[in-house]
């Protein structure tokens, strides 16, 4: 079931059907309440549709959720949360661009360390994704040079070669209908 939901999530995100993505993410959360991976995608949808306060809350809830790699139903079986994380990062999930956009969103919201994690997930989902690798290097350099802590929104330039100027709020691309200018690539 989770594999199908994450595949649908990737397909709908790739076609910028953000209302459908939100419904799918809520279905995942109904099956796996409080799941960090699903909460991150919910935060991304909120951000992309201009609901910044809701995005901040969803990302904060995701950050406070237990690490899926440490939660087990028993010693032989990963928990549902670990299954969500695994499915969302599979190369065939189609979520590489969603992870990338999440990284951009998190960086802009002032969470560069979490953004690096999202960009890494993007690379797991699509190993040949130079923009994600570039974004990781830009963020690492920025963190090292400026001593950035989580929760301090700052302008970070050069995350994406096309954006070269300061990051643009992804949510500002939305007209409120759930459709945006598409994933940042």
Image (cartoon, helix red, strand yellow):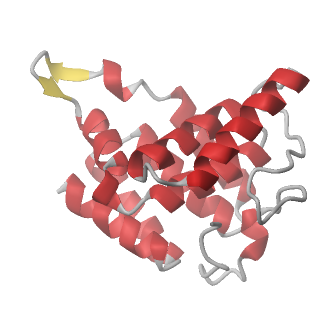
Across and down, in percent, residue 83 comes to 25, 40
- On the question of residue 96 being in view, the answer is yes
Q: Relative to 10, does residue 85 appear above or below in the rendering?
A: above
- Residue nearest the observer in this picture, 134 or 175: 134
Left or right: 85 as drawn, with respect to 143: left
x, y percent for residue 105: 69, 52
Name which residue lies at 67% across and 60% down. 47
Q: Nearer the viewer, residue 9 or 42?
A: 9
Q: Is residue 25 above or below residue 150?
A: below
At x 40%, y 59%, the residue is: 26
Q: Position of residue 28 (x, y in %)?
A: 32, 54
- The quadrant holding residue 66 is top left
Horizontally, residue 130 falls left or right of residue 153, namely left
Question: Residue 99 versus residue 52: which sits nearer the camera?
Answer: 99
The quarter of the image holding the N terminus is bottom left
Q: Residue at 90% of width from left, 25% of height from top?
A: 146
| Marker count (numbered) | 0
- Image quadrant in which the C terminus is located: bottom right
């Amino acid at each position: 079931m989770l594999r199908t939901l994450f595949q649908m999530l990737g397909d709908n995100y790739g076609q910028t059907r953000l209302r459908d993505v939100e419904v799918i993410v809520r279905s995942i959360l109904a099956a796996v309440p409080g799941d960090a991976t699903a909460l991150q995608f919910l935060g991304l949808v909120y951000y992309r549709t201009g609901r910044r306060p809701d995005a901040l809350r969803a990302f904060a809830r995701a950050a406070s959720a237990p690490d899926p790699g440490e939660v087990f139903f028993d010693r032989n079986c990963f928990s549902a949360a670990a299954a969500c994380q695994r499915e969302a990062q599979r190369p065939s999930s189609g979520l590489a661009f969603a992870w990338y956009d999440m990284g951009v969103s998190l960086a802009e919201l002032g969470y560069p360390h979490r953004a690096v994690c999202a960009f890494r997930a993007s690379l797991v989902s699509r190993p040949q994704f130079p923009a994600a690798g570039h974004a990781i290097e830009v963020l690492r350099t920025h963190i090292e040079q400026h001593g950035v802590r989580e929760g301090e929104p700052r302008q970070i330039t050069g995350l994406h070669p096309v954006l070269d100027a300061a990051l643009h709020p992804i949510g500002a691309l939305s007209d409120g209908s759930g459709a945006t200018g598409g994933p940042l690539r």
